[in-house]
Image (spheres, rainbow, N blue to C red):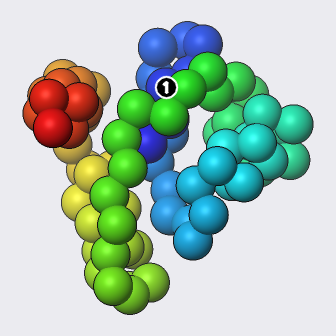
Amino acid sequence: MLLTEKGTFYCGYTDDVQKRFETHLQGKGAKYTRANKPIKIVYIQEFNSKSEAMKEERSIKKLTHKEKEILIKNFQKN
């Protein structure tokens, strides 16, 4: 999950987090990150399959902004 300059979060899946982040920074990523410039990676979770990752992405996108902040805080404690 990425934090944007506007304080919003962008959630997506990839097999290379750093490369995908750099793509977003170059304005070549998702339409959302072209309009909402990402500033840092705030949450990463690994999965054994693409389908598991996509399922988690859908779950995260359903969370409120506050719930995403809690998820990030718990991640950063580890």
Q: Quadrant of the N terminus?
A: top left
Q: Against 15, is 41 above or below?
A: above
* Residue 54 x, y percent position in the rendering: 39, 74
Give the number of callouts: 1
Image quarter for residue 32? top right
**Which residue is at the far front?**
78
Q: Bin the neighbour count of mark 1 within 10 Å (Cα to Cα): few under 14, some 14-19, many 20 and up.
A: some
Give left or right: position of 41 versus 31: left
* Residue 51 x, y percent position in the rendering: 38, 86
Q: Secondary structure at mark 1?
A: strand
Image quarter for residue 70? top left
* Residue 3 x, y percent position in the rendering: 49, 25
**Which residue is at the far top?**
6
Q: Nearer the viewer, residue 75 or 67?
A: 75
Residue under the point 40% across and 32% down = 42
Image quarter for residue 46? bottom left
Q: Nearer the viewer, residue 35 or 18?
A: 18
Q: Nearer the viewer, residue 47 or 62?
A: 47
Where is mark 1, residue-wise?
3
Give left or right: position of 37 versus 66: right
Q: Quadrant of the C terminus?
A: top left
Q: Can residue 58 be seen in the rendering of this structure?
A: no
Q: Against 64, is 39 above or below?
A: above
Give left or right: position of 49 versus 69: right
Q: Against 39, is 51 above or below?
A: below
* Residue 72 x, y percent position in the rendering: 24, 32
Residue under the point 32% across and 75% down = 47
Amino acid type indicated by mark 1: Leu
Residue under the point 50% across and 64% down = 13
Q: Can residue 24 be seen in the rendering of this structure?
A: yes
Residue under the point 76% across and 42% down = 22
Q: Against 10, is 3 above or below?
A: above
